[in-house]
Amino acid sequence: MALAKKGSAKAFPVIALVLSVISGIVAPIVSIATVVNVAADNTTATVDEATTKIGEVVKTDSGLNVTVSAVTCGLATAPNTFEGLDPVVPQGQFCQIDFTVENAGDKEAILFPNYFGGLIGDVQYAADSSSSKFTGDNSMSITLNPGLSVTGVAFVDIAAGQTLDAITFSDGILGSEISILNK
């Protein structure tokens, strides 16, 4: 409208028009590049990639040292993260994953206990968010500063009679996953 209006300055409307055309070209390119980059970095762990076992330290790309100390399956309930509420009942059975995460990196890490999960074959199972927690802490997340560590438990609901082949840990929503053999 400013370009068609008689007697008005044309410099700013022309600049705005040129910038909007350029952004219309650049925006889809940046969006596509972002999606490709995220897809390339967000790999999913498999049992075949697991080289460490229970009790061994696994180092993530983001500087976290993860140790799974025990896995216990066949549990009929798990404690509720929210005090005063009834225990959580699985649809099948719970596997309890006892873990320690140490921040050996140089920046803070925001962690959720349900970053842990499990694999049966290459099928992924997520941790139950209403029962998984950090030891001594009922919050849904924790900020772990460099040099500090935290322990916790994660509960994974799987079919009765099965066991987890591997334990998974993802160091964030867009982070890569690691897997630890359950042996």
Image (tube, rainbow, N blue to C red):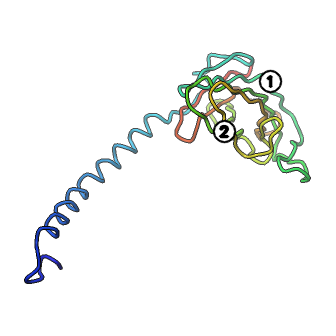
> From the viewer's perspective, is 175 left or right of 118?
left
Residue 112 in which image quadrant: top right
Q: Mark 1 and mark 2 in contact (Cβ < 8 Å)?
A: no
Q: Earlier in the sequence, mark 2 or mark 1?
A: 1
The image shows residue 81, relative to residue 160, as above or below, that is below
Q: Which residue is mark 2?
A: 143
- The count of marks equals 2
Spatial separation of the CA atoms under disc 2 and disc 1:
24 Å
| Farthest bottom residue in view | 6
What percent of the width, then of the height, locates residue 62? Answer: 54, 28
Q: Which residue is mark 1?
A: 70
Mark whose residue sits in front, 2 or 1: 2
Q: Is residue 100 above or below residue 123?
A: above
In the rendered view of the protein, which quadrant contains the C terminus? top right
Query: In the image, what residue occupies the spot 76% across and 46% down?
Result: 139
Report the amino acid beneath label 1: Ala
**SS class, disc 2:** strand
Q: Is residue 117 left or right of residue 48?
A: right
Frontmost residue, 42 versus 15: 15
Identify the residue at horizontal 16%, vertical 68% (top origin).
12
SS for dot 1: strand
Q: Nearer the viewer, residue 59 or 136?
A: 136
Q: Residue at x 67, y 32 (%)?
A: 119
